[in-house]
Image (spheres, helix red, strand yellow):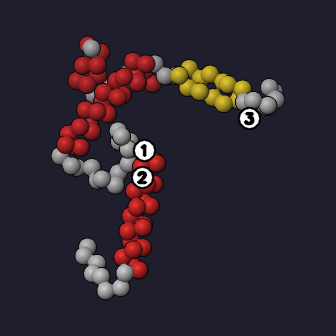
Amino acid sequence: MELFNKCLHLGTFPDPLKLGNIILFKKEGKHEDEASSYRPISLLPTIGKVLEKLLTQMRNYPLERLKKISDDQYGFREGRSTELAIHHLIKKSMMAKRKILMPGTLNRH
């Protein structure tokens, strides 16, 4: 906890927590002697992930509470996925299409 508090107080993210170990996984059915036959995975220190999550929550909580982030912002927000963004886009498109197809309606924007 002392490390987290010190990082918050100084406004820093220690360099050692940014370094990861890269592990290569061979893709099935690929030749071992080709670089494209491997998928790299970066393993980051767990404590760095926890600190990053804490910093993100501390930054986002007041912004969310005060409604300073648009409802249309899906990236980098907890509980907002690309699937949800696509669903929202399709819903808005269908609503817009219905307005166009209904003659005599007023568009109140």
The residue depicted at 19 percent of the width and 43 percent of the height is: 65
Pointers 3 and 2 in contact (CB under 8 A)? no
The quarter of the displayed image where residue 92 is located? bottom left
Which tag is nearer the camera, tag 3 or tag 2? 2
Above or below — where is 101 with respect to 82? Answer: below
Residue denoted by label 2: 85
**Residue at the location (39% across, 74% down)?**
98
Query: Disc 2, disc 1: CB below 8 Å?
Result: yes
The amino acid marked with disc number 1 is Ser
Q: Pointer 1: what residue?
A: 81
Q: Quadrant of the C terminus?
A: bottom left
Front label number (3 vs 1): 1
Q: Label 2 is placed on what type of residue?
A: Ala
Please name the residue shown 32% across and 33% down the image: 56
What residue did someone put label 3 on? 36
Q: How many marks?
A: 3
Q: Is residue 95 visible?
A: yes
Q: Earlier in the sequence, mark 3 or mark 1?
A: 3
Q: Give how far across and how far down residue 23 sits, in percent.
A: 62, 22
**Residue 95 found in image quarter:** bottom left
Q: Is residue 78 left or right of residue 5?
A: right
Give SS at disc 1.
Answer: loop
